[in-house]
Image (cartoon, coloured by chain):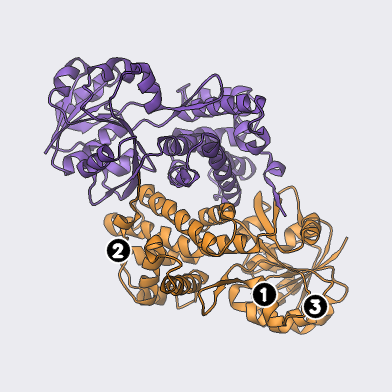
Chain colours: A orange, B purple
Amino acid sequence: MSIITIVGAGMMGSAMSYPACDNGHQVRLVGTHLDEEIIDHVKDNGIHPKLQRKLPECIKPYHIAELEEALKGADLVIGGVSSFGVDWFAEKVLPLIPDTLPVLSVTKGLLDQPDGQLLTFPEAMRRKLGGSCSLSLNAIGGPCTSYELADRRHTSVVFCGDNPEILRKLKSMLETSYYHISLSTDVMGVECAVALKNAYALVVSLAVGLVEAQDGIGCTQAYNPQAALFGQSLREMKRIIKMAGAKEDNLVYGAGDLYVTIFGGRTRKLGTLLGRGLRFDCAMAELEGITLESVVITTRIARALRKRAQDRSISLSDFPLLMHIDDVINNNMPVAIPWKSIEFEDI
Amino acid sequence: MSIITIVGAGMMGSAMSYPACDNGHQVRLVGTHLDEEIIDHVKDNGIHPKLQRKLPECIKPYHIAELEEALKGADLVIGGVSSFGVDWFAEKVLPLIPDTLPVLSVTKGLLDQPDGQLLTFPEAMRRKLGGSCSLSLNAIGGPCTSYELADRRHTSVVFCGDNPEILRKLKSMLETSYYHISLSTDVMGVECAVALKNAYALVVSLAVGLVEAQDGIGCTQAYNPQAALFGQSLREMKRIIKMAGAKEDNLVYGAGDLYVTIFGGRTRKLGTLLGRGLRFDCAMAELEGITLESVVITTRIARALRKRAQDRSISLSDFPLLMHIDDVINNNMPVAIPWKSIEFEDI
């Protein structure tokens, strides 16, 4: 039995308490300053108000003020913040963590550099900590919604990091009969694949709205247009993984993740609204202006691709869907799927 | 304007009349001996009883007895039979077609050879016709349901064949604002990808039934387990395409096709019943014993893989989902997803 401290009491961070507790660990769930209310609820009755489920008995909730206490004697820290909390996590939490204590992060995303290179969050955090940091920063990729993990549905994820021995240890600490863990040292490949799925889930969801615009909201679903965009999305995702110098095979984690992301949540909602004909600013107003990870990642990747196209190391015409959704988001353009540009001749 | 003769008046064959008519062609729709009733209906009121839609005005329906008349002066023959009709099509229809008249087939499927090699339908038909045959046999792959094609939904398909010029001509005859056509001379890659999707749609659908068995039929859908099987399905499909000596990139046509096939039809129904716990014989009884393409293709591919494993050119452990669904189908085994065998170490 070990002590696992989860920092970030949002949906996914909190859901990690299920496989952790089912392995017999003591779990300390620490809310960020944005999670004060959640932690109050959990302290009060054990129920997570957003997950709308009782958290496992073994967890002990902590407010952010109690962070240092929650880290004492821990064997593993799980980073449970969203991509918007990564800087905070790197600046406020990581410096408190000794080099011997591994970190496993649920955060999905990528950063782009001025030269068009992509940067994974583990690498970005390492750079923030300075060159001398020898902290083991690992991440979780693959298709996993927090509700379903909390319901102990069969879920296949991948843990990625630099050190095979640490990855194996993390797996042994968290695998259960329902939480299935692959391991990979191709951090860029995995992180790229699973970050991209947010951008492309937005793209595929456009097809839902396009059909609704034709037939009315709530009409029969049409899958041919979604499948057309799904196939092309995989093509573009694979090219971006290749551009990043990572293993194209790890596309499968992003493909599964894309599959699961299309079926619900705010990214699908936004894609559907855009597909129905709303301009981006109006669609965001309907979503009450909440910034979505899909919007951020799309913008970053498009910026990186444009930079690389200037250097002529890639051609933007290989990424018609990403460049289009970027236009829709950042230039308030109407949706007009570039169907002709996703027809290919391989003859 | 050309004359296009569609042989086979099932759902997909008949749906091809929409892009054909929208291109201004004369379309002759010839029912097989199994389609007599359909053709009677179409002759009577223009409505296709299975598609439940009025066929375009430009089509002229023919009974099989009128086949030779329907082929007179044709510029293109579309083969609209299912995989169960391929032998009939090769024996009864192809011999009537002059070498100058190209054939484009909607049929998806593969055959396996005694040595474990896979054979596409175009190649199988060519062999049946004898070595001297110089007929141009082309095929359509990619995600396309007949209902949605008839509703003129955006649809991306790929035409494959040996001759680039003929492929381009076929595209120019059939492309519309909604029917988007890529071209490929990698017949094996395309055919392999789109045939495999039937087997793997069965696999992914197991997850639907597994969740229903736990929570009750009609419960909330759970996508984590589906996504886990979806990702692994792509992995196995890619390996089979590689084994067949074809281009792995053409997996995307199968991926889109898998996506669309999971959402409906008898294969999903069968997978769901099996996932709920029914043995194959009981599930088939519930489906009134109709032979499904997914069952046939699974059996053929598994047989080919076993043969190749005997030769040690592949390892069966690389195909855990296909071998499991084959056991479920052909050995009446209960469903027990081999979750541990789809965890990987790439470190």
Q: Chain of mark 1?
A: A
Regarding residue B52, the answer to whether it shows in the image is: no
| Mark 3 vs mark 1: in front | 3
A280 displayed left or right of B315: left
Badge number at residue A97: 3
Locate residue B131 relative to residue B316 in the image: left or right: left
What chain is tagged by disc 3? A
Along the viewing direction, whichever of A288 and A260 lies nearer the viewer: A260
Q: Nearer the viewer, residue A274 or A318?
A: A318
Q: Secondary structure at mark 1?
A: helix
Q: Which residue is mark 1?
A: A38
* Residue pictured at 31% horizontal, 44% vertical: B148
Real-space Cα distance between discs 3 and 1?
Answer: 24 Å
Asked if marks 2 and 3 fall on the same chain, the answer is yes
Q: Position of residue A202 (x, y in %)?
A: 44, 63
> Which amino acid type corresponds to the residue marked 3 in the rendered image?
Ile
Residue B297 shown left or right of residue A316 in the figure: right
Marking on residue A336: 2
Which kind of residue does numbered mark 1 sit on? Answer: Ile
